[in-house]
Structures are given as C-alpha cells and as structure tokens.
Amino acid sequence: MKRMDMVLLKAGISVGILHVGALYPFNFWWRFFQGAPGCDVNILGSKIPSCVQFPAKILRNNYRMTYTGDRMRGPIYKTLKPDSSSCRLIVKGQGVFLFRTVDNTAPCIFYVYNPDRSDGYRVEFTLDHVSISRISDHTSYVDAKNCMGLVNTNGAYYWFSLDSQNQTLRVGIGEARVETIIYQFTFFFQDNDDRKTNKLFMESLETIQISSESTEVEPIRIIRDPVTNKMPAVVKDRDSLSMDDIAKGTYLPKANLSLAAQQLYDCIAGKKFILDDYDFPDFTQAIEYSIKTPGCWCHEKLKEKSTEFNKDKPNLLETYLRITLGENNGESPGIPYVMEIWPVGHYSPIHNHSAANAIIRVLNGEINVSQFPFLCASKDGVPPFTIANFHKDQITWISPTLNQTHQLRNLPGNAYSCITIQCYMYDQTDKGHYDYFDYIDDNGDEQKYEPDSDMDFIQFKELMKKEWANRPTQSAMDIIGSYYNRIKAIIIGWVF
C-alpha cells in the first residue's frame, strides 16, 4: 500500500511540474529527481519533505532555484571586518584582497602565506611604488612601469590579485579590474619543471596577514576570482552570442551574471518590453512633447527638481525623471524597477549604487556612461577609467564589486531624450541593505540620495496619453507619424 501511495504521489507531482516545467531547464529537473545539491526535494529517493507544496514553492522563488551553479561553487566574495588582521582566500592560490588605509603616508605591509606560514609573498605599498618579494629568499619582483602606490585621494581603496593559474601578481587602486592596475608581474620560466614548481607554490597560498606595523589598514573583502581580462560592458543572452563573441570577450554572457542580476535581466530583456506598444504607440513622442512643452508634467517636474542634488545651486541640466514600476519589497535600494528619462544635455552627478546588483537597458535614444574607480569626495575628483555610449536595446550591468560608480549623460548633440529601465537588487549575501546612493555634489562633498519616485508608471502613462490627446492641432506629419507608430506596434504584437 505504501508503495502504491508513493507511485500516486509521484504521478501527482509530475502533473504539477508540467505547469511550471517551462521555467526550468532539463538539468535542473534531473538534479531535482536525483536529489542533488541545490534542490530541496528528492522524488526518486525515499525522502520527500514537503513535496506536496513544491510547485507553489517554485513559483514563490521563481528564478532563484533556476540557477544553482554559484551556490554549488560557493561564494563569489566575502566581506571582511575592518578590524580583522588576517583572512583566508576563498580558493587557495587565487583571489583578490581589497583594503583601504586610514593613513596614506605610512607604508602598508601584508603577507600572503602558505599553510605553515613558512613561505609566501611580502607586499608593501608606499607613496610612490609597490614592492613584492618572496618571503623565503627575499627575491624581489619588480614591475618597471610601476610608479604609484598609496594615493592621497579621498575614497581611494586598493587591491592585490593572486593568480596561480596564469602565475601573475597584480595590484590596483579602486575597483579590482584591468583598467585600474598599477603593478603587474608575470612569472616566466625557460624550464617547465621550474614553472610547475612555482605554480604549486602559488597554489599553496591561502592566508592574508596584515603586518603588525600597518595598524591603519582596514580590510574590505576577499573576491574569489583573480583579475585577468577586461570585463565586457554589454550583456547578451545565449541566443545572441557567437563563438567569436566568447573568444574575443566582446560581450558578457547573461549566464555569467550573479543570480540576482540574472533575475533582473530576465524581467526586462524581453522583446515585448518596449515603450511604443499597441496600448500607446505614441508613448515616446508624448514624453518628448511633455518635456518640451511648458505647462506639461515632464517640463514642470524637471524644473522642480533643479535643486535636487545641490540645494543652493539650481541646475536644470543635472536632473532626470524617475518613473517607478511596482513597490519596494525590501530587496533593493528604493523601488527595484525605475524608468529614467534623460532629456538631451541632462546628466547625473557622479554616484554609486549601494553595493547592489543592477541591470540597465536603453529603451530609447542613447546614454553616455563614465565609470570611475571609486567615489571621490573632492572638488577635483578622479578621472574616469572608461567612457562608453549605449544605444537602444543594449543592456549593461552593475555588480556589488564592479561598475558601481558612474555618471550618466545624454550628450548635448543627441537628437532624442534617452529613456532607460534601471533595476536593482541586493546580493543574496548582503545583510546590510544600505538604502542610499552616495553622490558628489558641486562642492566636492559626498552626499546621500535616497532613491525615490517621481510618479508610478501606470499613472505616468495615463497622464502622457491625456497630454498627447489634448495637444494643439496636429500637423499632417504628426498624423502620419502617429499612424506609422500604430502600424509598427501592431506588427510587433503579431510577431512577438
């Protein structure tokens, strides 16, 4: 009887799975039935905890159970306590150690040790250089191009990257990435046995120990993977990627995003996620009209926001509109989905993103993005390490450790307002949930901005419909353009 009950139970669950099967790839279901790590239930085995409720549980945790790779591999980074003097790498022989120092005039020294601390590397930062040497024989590894070390710049932090697979040591300032490197040394050996010996040594390293002389050093985090190549700015899904794209590193595969970022991407990357749909094919034109027309909502709201970032210095160009979708569920800084409207010539202050994940898609026009190594509270600031333009339907990304600090700008020479969808989510390991975007005001001071809403999306769309319908007599070109937009929206509805 028990065996028959089990068969019936399996059959019932299988029927329920058909309703949600399309959400999950085959390899997930195989692990699910086998009871592999990353799955809550084992149907083929004897233990079936809470399996009657399983389909509902999948729906409540949509996407989070879809991608199990990161969970099975372990954490990507680990936040450290500022007063800790030592920490372990997440994976032996590789990783990035990030830290800041309170006193940029005093040398900063730490060690990278093997298990018994008999050997490793000594790393020293001074005002004008970085020096790294072998502990056992004091051999120095010199980068002839290195001419920087500690910098007397507000907000600066530093990183050291250990890469045993490529036998490379790297050091940088700000975000741990190729663009911020100030020191690099790669080991080369004529003899293959020497190469293997050095690789084994590097693979044995596991502990970072701050010197007792460097009392001003504050650890920030350990990142699992070393700095190797440049990270592409544009994200594409698997159906849009070619073998050349992967080989050249032209685009970031969606699968390489964090679980939280993948969830955000899936919500806004669809072909029907557009402004000019069948319901309102003139939506973008209506927004442009509202921006340019005195008395219309967009025009007046932008004027009202001219002191948002500098209370005593009104600046109409340093404004944009935030139209929010949904509610704040406590998973993000502010409401997670925000449609941002950037009139031509308008820009944001330099700001960061609460160490949250983010996905940004351009829905109309193009946006210019300047990225910075860190948020510098100074009148002079720091120069961006890259500047890029993103055009309609391109998608870019932010992670807790990369692309965090930027400035957005709709360049004065552009023809149209830029409209983006920006979505945010704290990482699963983030227990602090910092609710603000820090930014730099015109005086060079760091300020806090609490992400807010200028209007709900549904209300905004209805308001744009009314303003568009009540505009003065239309020209022949307006009428032709309106019909063109309607036909385009109908075709899009048929195709997708």
Image (spheres, rainbow, N blue to C red):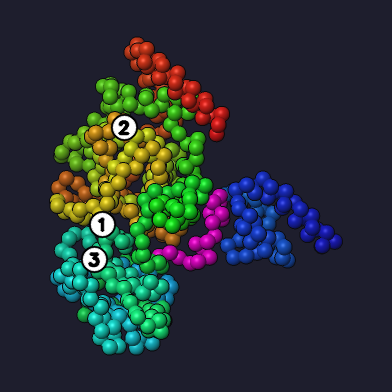
Q: Quadrant of residue 119?
A: bottom left
Q: Which portion, as a residue range, is magenta?
A: 61-83
Where in the figure is residue 245, as x and y percent of width and height?
Answer: 44, 52
Per the image, label 2 sits on a secondary structure element best described as loop
- Other-residue count near label 2 (Cα within 10 Å), few / some / many at <14 / 14–19 / ≥20: many
Where in the figure is residue 375, as x and y percent of width and height?
Answer: 24, 55
Three-letter amino acid code of the residue under disc 3: Ile
- Other-residue count near label 1 (Cα within 10 Å), few / some / many at <14 / 14–19 / ≥20: many
Q: Nearer the viewer, residue 185 or 97?
A: 185
Where in the figure is residue 111, as x and y percent of width and height?
Answer: 29, 79
Q: Quadrant of the N terminus?
A: bottom right
Which tag, 2 or 1, sits closer to the chain's start? Answer: 1
Q: Quadrant of the C terminus?
A: top right
Per the image, label 3 sits on a secondary structure element best described as strand
Residue at 76%, 55% in the rendered image: 9
Residue at 60%, 53% in the rendered image: 25
Task: Residue 335: tell me if it is visible.
Answer: no
Three-letter amino acid code of the residue under disc 2: Ser
Marks 2 and 3, how far apart in space? 38 Å
Three-letter amino acid code of the residue under disc 1: Phe
Residue at 29%, 42% in the rendered image: 368
Marks 1 and 3, how far apart in space? 15 Å
Q: Is residue 46 left or right of residue 200?
A: right
The dot on residue 182 is 3
Q: Nearer the viewer, residue 49 or 375?
A: 375
Magenta stretch holds residue 170: no
The dot on residue 417 is 2
Residue topped by disc 1: 374
